[in-house]
Amino acid sequence: DAEITQSPRHKITETGRQVTLACHQTWNHNNMFWYRQDLGHGLRLIHYSYGVQDTNKGEVSDGYSVSRSNTEDLPLTLESAASSQTSVYFCASSDPTSGRRTGELFFGEGSRLTVL
Amino acid sequence: GEDVEQSLFLSVREGDSSVINCTYTDSSSTYLYWYKQEPGAGLQLLTYIFSNMDMKQDQRLTVLLNKKDKHLSLRIADTQTGDSAIYFCAESIDDYKLSFGAGTTVTVRA
């Protein structure tokens, strides 16, 4: 079955370190997204991509970067981790060519990051 | 997700109906969604409604849309313990991006 996987599922790091969260999907979806989930804020969009070599900033992109070198992967990098980036991170994908055009997002199981 | 608002908590007795409310701001949203998040898992689409509809029913779920007031609600009939989860309201903000509310944690008590 096609799926979307995130790794690592849990990570503890120190302030100032670089961290990369991986996201891999096997649906061949063009659209991929990174959200962070924080209590009281719900999901906020960090970065998104509509295809290979395309990346765009979301509402909370400061301190994060992404790259899209192939259809399957959209890694999220925290250049210098800060305590404010402690959160649960969700990757999602969608298929704009499904015909339904409902914009349904398919989510990974999340990566819990703690920055000490 | 600040443009979509929903209450944070709802407690309901097993067998009763649950109603979760949401307000949104973008009147041009084509679709509005309800996602469900179970503990330790990602979000899954529960149901959606096209913006030209007033109501959509899907088994125990009823979605009501009031475009004039930008109000969306989700009613779960005969709520079961398996319905305990966080429910997110979301609106489409362009063809592909979604804006989510803060989520309503529904607790079903016996």
Image (cartoon, coloured by chain):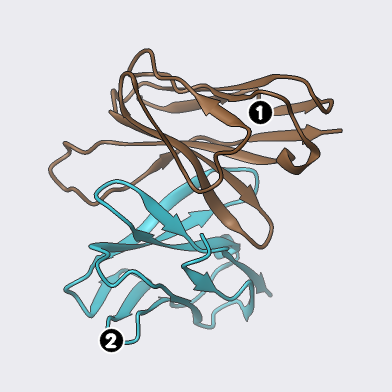
Q: Colour of chain A?
A: brown
A107 to the left or right of B84: left
Position of the N terminus of chain A, as image quadrant, is top left
Q: Is residue B103 visible?
A: yes
Which amino acid, by three-letter code, is at mark 2? Answer: Lys
- Mark 2 burial class by Cα count in 10 Å: few <14, some 14-19, many 20+: few
User: In the image as oriented, which residue stretches furthest toward the left?
Assistant: A99
Determine whether A108 is above or below B7 in the image: above
**Residue at label 2?**
B68
In the image, which disc is placed on residue A26?
A: none
Residue A8 position (above or below residue B108)? above
Farthest top residue? A69
Is B108 placed above or below B85 here? Answer: below
Q: Position of residue A83 (x, y in %)?
A: 80, 39
Check disc 1 and report the residue beneath it.
Answer: A9
Circle 2 sits in a helix, a strand or a loop, which is it? Answer: loop
Q: Quick one: which chain is cyan? A: B
Query: Mark 1 Cα within 10 Å, few/some/many (few <14, many 20+)?
Result: some
Subunit ID for the residue under disc 1: A
* Residue type for callout 1: Arg
- Secondary element under disc 1, as helix, strand or loop, is loop
